Image (cartoon, rainbow, N blue to C red):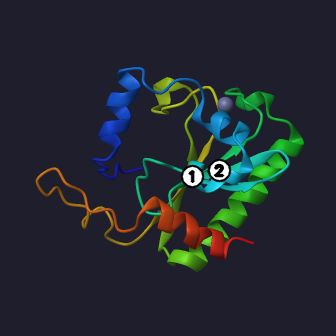
Amino acid sequence: MEVIWAPWRLSYVSNVTKGKEKGCFICRAIEDDPSRDRENLLLYRGKKAIVILNRFPYNTAHLMVCPIRHTGDFLSLLPEELAEIDELLKRSIRAIKRAYNPDGFNIGLNLGKVSGGSVDTHIHYHVVPRWLGDTNFMPVTAGVKVIPQSLDETYDRLKTFWE
Ligand SMILES: [Zn+2]
């Protein structure tokens, strides 16, 4: 997978390095009151899995599908967890297709810190929509990246197209 240059990830990386991010952000969002789901970018709550927008996206509508149970051990995932994760991956792809009409997707799992994953304690599948040429129109302009759509707008749009 080619790397899409995403400068707003720098604040994330530096925060992690400085240890500002404490605990598991996925669990924090799940355990928070559902009335704050929009603020937490939690798009959908299932029985065994959830869908949450990536706060530091590689692309517009970059979201993550995670088991509700806090585990980093893929082999420990239960059949009912895997089944719902599969279902939510399908629903995520369907919603993003309807909302944004991408040309393709990168979907994947990073297991363990060495794989490049930022959080190795709570499994999360990345769903990253791709448009032809999207690596080309993400230029460096004095270190400022124009994000095509704010996270709030993306959240609302995906919510509208979610079934
Ligand atoms: Zn967790």
Going 65% across and 52% down the picture, which residue do you hit? 37
Left or right of 33 on screen, residue 80: right
Going 41% across and 63% down the picture, which residue do you hit? 150
Res. 123 visible in picture: no
Q: Position of residue 75 (x, y in %)?
A: 76, 29
Secondary structure at numbered mark 2:
helix
The residues bearing labels 2 and 1 have C-alpha atoms spaced at a distance of: 5 Å
Quadrant holding the C terminus: bottom right
Going 44% across and 63% down the picture, which residue do you hit? 60
Q: Tell me the residue that label 1 is attached to.
A: 39
What is the count of numbered marks?
A: 2
Farthest residue in the right direction? Answer: 80
Q: Are marks 2 and 1 in contact (CB under 8 Å)?
A: yes
Amino acid type, mark 2 = Arg
Nearer to us in this view, 8 or 135: 8
Res. 90 visible in picture: yes
Figure check: 20 above or below 57 = above
Q: Tell me the residue that label 2 is attached to.
A: 36
Left or right of 127 on screen, residue 5: left
Q: Is mark 2 within 8 Å of ligand 1?
A: no
Nearer to us in this view, 157 or 118: 157
Amino acid type, mark 1 = Glu
Q: Quadrant of residue 161?
A: bottom right
Q: Position of residue 117 (x, y in %)?
A: 49, 33
Secondary structure at numbered mark 1:
helix
Going 36% across and 22% down the picture, which residue do you hit? 17
Q: Position of residue 109 (x, y in %)?
A: 59, 42
